[in-house]
Image (spheres, grey):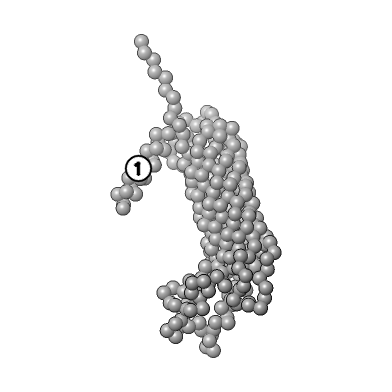
Amino acid sequence: MLRKIVSLSFIVLSLTVFGQRNVTDSIIGTPWVGVHYGGNWTGGDLANRYGYLNHLGFMAGYKTNKNLYLGMEANFIFGNDLDTSLNHIFDHLLDSYGHITDVNGDIAKVLVYSRGMHINLSIGKVIPVLSTNKNSGIFLHGGVGILVHHLRIETQDQVIPQLELDYKKGYDRLSIGPNLHQFVGYAFLANGGYYNFYGGFYCQQGFTKNQRTINFDQPDVPVSKKTMFDLQYGFRLGWFIPFYKREVKDYYFD
């Protein structure tokens, strides 16, 4: 396995080196593929469930020779900072000693995390400033996509009948809906090597709805079907690989 990973790494690096060309004197159309990390704080209705959220994802797109950008991105959302109201969703499962017990009668440990994902389509532009390289500059993009978020409930290796299989759905607060996003930052493309990166400020507005018909911790309270406003805002840092076409060489024959 290690040999395959090393071989694949050499292939990727070789392709990148093969495609390097001087990008300082002209704007070049090139595919972009990259990975990124983002840290986000929550607002709106989302803040009633989660606190700080992490985004880990990838992007793929194309920058034209006019410095226009078209692409897509996908992000895995995760965190463990929950609103205090969610700390009590299993209170009705507690015994007289304040414990949740598993199928063997042992004290169980239940962990709850925030999880989600989103997939976005983006359109943007690179404005060449602060660099002699015309492919580097202020990087702006925005777009639309779909957002999914929920609670992940883990019971480790213990079996808790009330939290197994489909019973988890009665607590997970699954919500899905469209979203908008905006990014303002800087993209740097090196003339050679692999020092290509981007970073800046990120903001997302989701318009999600609850997908469950009942919450087991509140069986007598109807689940709201109104559209929620899920705000996320923070920063993003990423590294990407541009793939340039081989330069055309002129050959002269006597």
- Relative to residue 216, is residue 61 depicted above or below? above
- Relative to residue 171, is residue 126 depicted above or below? above
Question: What's under tag 1, amino acid-wise?
Answer: Phe
Percent x, y of residue 14: 37, 38
- The residue that appears at 59% across and 45% down in the rendered structure is 122
Quadrant of image for the C terminus = top left
Q: Residue furthest bottom?
A: 96
Name the side, left or right, on which 121 lies relative to 196.
right
* Disc 1 element: helix
Percent x, y of residue 10: 35, 42
Of the pair 149 and 165, the residue shown nearer to us: 165
- The residue that appears at 60% across and 60% down in the rendered structure is 176
- The quarter holding residue 91 reads bottom right
Percent x, y of residue 3: 30, 49
Percent x, y of residue 15: 39, 37
| Badge 1: residue crowd in 10 Å (few <14, some 14–19, many ≥20) | few
Of the pair 76 and 223, the residue shown nearer to us: 223
Name the side, left or right, on which 109 lies relative to 182.
left
Q: Is residue 67 visible?
A: yes
Of the pair 135 and 225, the residue shown nearer to us: 225
Q: Is residue 133 visible?
A: no
- The residue that appears at 31% across and 53% down in the rendered structure is 1
Check disc 1 and report the residue beneath it: 10
- The quarter holding residue 204 reads bottom right
- Relative to residue 252, is residue 186 depicted above or below? below
